[in-house]
Amino acid sequence: GQQLNQSPQSMFIQEGEDVSMNCTSSSIFNTWLWYKQDPGEGPVLLIALYKAGELTSNGRLTAQFGITRKDSFLNISASIPSDVGIYFCAGRYISNFGNEKLTFGTGTRLTIIP
Amino acid sequence: NAGVTQTPKFRILKIGQSMTLQCTQDMNHNYMYWYRQDPGMGLKLIYYSVGAGITDKGEVPNGYNVSRSTTEDFPLRLELAAPSQTSVYFCASSYAGSKNIQYFGAGTRLSVL
């Protein structure tokens, strides 16, 4: 099965630093989604992107839908301790017949060094 | 708001045992999904349902069965548990439509020994 290429796999940063992660795919998507997963919990949606080129912010988070529809990035500014967790990208493709497929990246584990 | 509720949170099975993972949602979503998450990996779709009485296979359906008799419930059945089914299982639900977003449960951690 297809998986998105998400990088980096892990990041170790100091509080206050900015963070950037991205996902690339060989296939196009109609929608890009970014989720955060805390330990022992399910993924929680952070940002949804619906159009190629779209740039969307949610507080300190900013994400963009690549113009080729094959990539997306997520930036976190001025990181804080509660940003720790695993971030997943997901690409959604909806066919002309209405069939939907959601493909997840392998995740970026964010750790904040005291 | 309860959202998507999964039970149990943890379970240990012996090889060959069977069990049902429960999932219920109170958001009147018509779509429901089951994923598994292996260590260091993203989520992989096992089965999904677009409405009561309708189910379809995802990417990794072998060894699992599902049913959807009501809008609210979407149980996942393991008939003959195998060590390869050791994983964390997530249930999700969403509305249909181009802007639907999947909401996830907290997961069931399953170990098959």
Image (tube, helix red, strand yellow):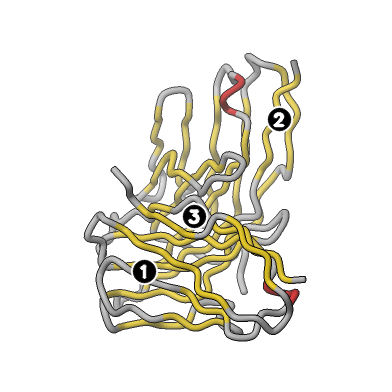
Disc 1 element: strand
Q: Earlier in the sequence, mark 1 or mark 2?
A: 1
> In the image, which disc is placed on residue A68?
3
Task: Identify which residue is drawn at 65% across, 81% down.
Answer: B17
Pointer 3 or 1: first along the chain: 3
Q: CA distance from mark 2 to mark 3?
A: 31 Å
For the residues tagged 1 and 2, is the chain the same? yes
The residue type indicated by label 2 comes to Thr
List the residue tagged with mark 2.
A111
Letter of the chain that mark 1 sits on in the rendering: A
Q: Quadrant of the N terminus of chain B?
A: top left
Residue depicted at x 42% and y 67%:
B33
Question: Where residue A108 appears, x then y in whole percent?
Answer: 66, 43
The quarter of the rendered structure image containing the C terminus of chain B is bottom right
Q: Position of residue A62 (x, y in %)?
A: 47, 31
Query: Helix or strand or loop: what does disc 3 sit on?
Result: loop
Picture coordinates of residue A88, whole percent (x, y): 57, 48
Q: Residue at x 57, y 39 (%)?
A: A38
Q: Residue furthest left?
A: B28
In the figure, is residue B97 to the left or right of A110?
left
Mark 3 vs mark 1: give the one in front. Answer: 1
The residue closer to the viewer here, A11 or B10, is B10
Mark 1 lies on residue: A94
Q: Chain of mark 3?
A: A
| Rendered view: A112 above or below B89 | above
Identify the image quadrant of residue A10: top right
Q: Would you call the spot at circle 3 few (<14 residues within 10 Å), some (14-19), or many (20 or more)? A: few
Between disc 2 and disc 3, whose residue precedes?
3
The local crowd at label 2, few if under 14, some if 14 to 19, many if 20 or more residues have their Cα within 10 Å, is some
